[in-house]
Image: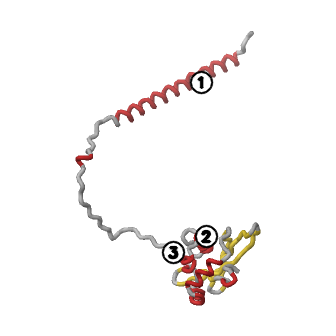
Amino acid sequence: MHTSSIEVRAKKRKMKLNTSSHFYVLVFMAVLQLLLTQCTTSHDKQVDEPSVQDIKPTEQKTTLQQDTISTTTRMDNPIFMHGASIGNLFNAYYKIGAYEELVSLTDSSTVNRYGRTKLQRLYNKLNYGYPMKLLNRSMEGNKQVLHYEVSIQATTIIKRLHVVIEQDTARIVPSNLERGELFQ
């Protein structure tokens, strides 16, 4: 059997590639071994650590510096309050039974009309706590209207939540609490 000169050259090139790749593997292994040797020898040095008997209790005074960072949470944006919209925040408080927090997110005219105690009872009876997603916001006079996509008993509908800004805080204006309706 006779091999052509092209086949001979191809075999030589293949052998050359194999030997050059072996060379790179050997260089890599040598570098890796050097690195590992350096890492292990640097940690072998003796370090004098204090024993438990050497440690004596000391009196420390802690002072609060005037330049500490204080963060304030803005509550006047109904779209973004504590990382969620006011409807989602209200929903979370409802699900955990934090009715006092629900009252604090309610507009002052509703609180004055019902009183805090009755308002908490109404929120306790509210049919709420379903999955909801904020779609958009619109304005109606001095009120902002948040539009939510709500899923109730496998039915998706759009509900509107009225919001006002009072004392730098967004507050919900319930639709009809006596009938258990928060949304319009």
Which residue is at 56% across, 84% downward? 117
How busy is the neighbourhood of tag 2: few (under 14 within 10 Å), some, or many (20 plus)?
Answer: few
| Three-letter code for the amino acid on which mark 1 is drawn | Leu
Q: Residue furthest top?
A: 1
Disc number for residue 74: 3
**SS for tag 2?**
helix
Tell me the distance, in whole angstroms, between the alpha carbons under discs 2 and 3: 23 Å
Which residue is at 54% across, 76% downward? 101
**Residue topped by disc 2:** 95
| Three-letter code for the amino acid on which mark 3 is drawn | Arg
| Three-letter code for the amino acid on which mark 2 is drawn | Lys
Quadrant of residue 57 in the image?
bottom left
Count of number-bearing discs: 3
Tell me the distance, in whole angstroms, between the alpha carbons under discs 1 and 2: 67 Å
Which residue is at 59% across, 76% downward? 78
Mark 2 or mark 3: whose residue is earlier in sequence? 3
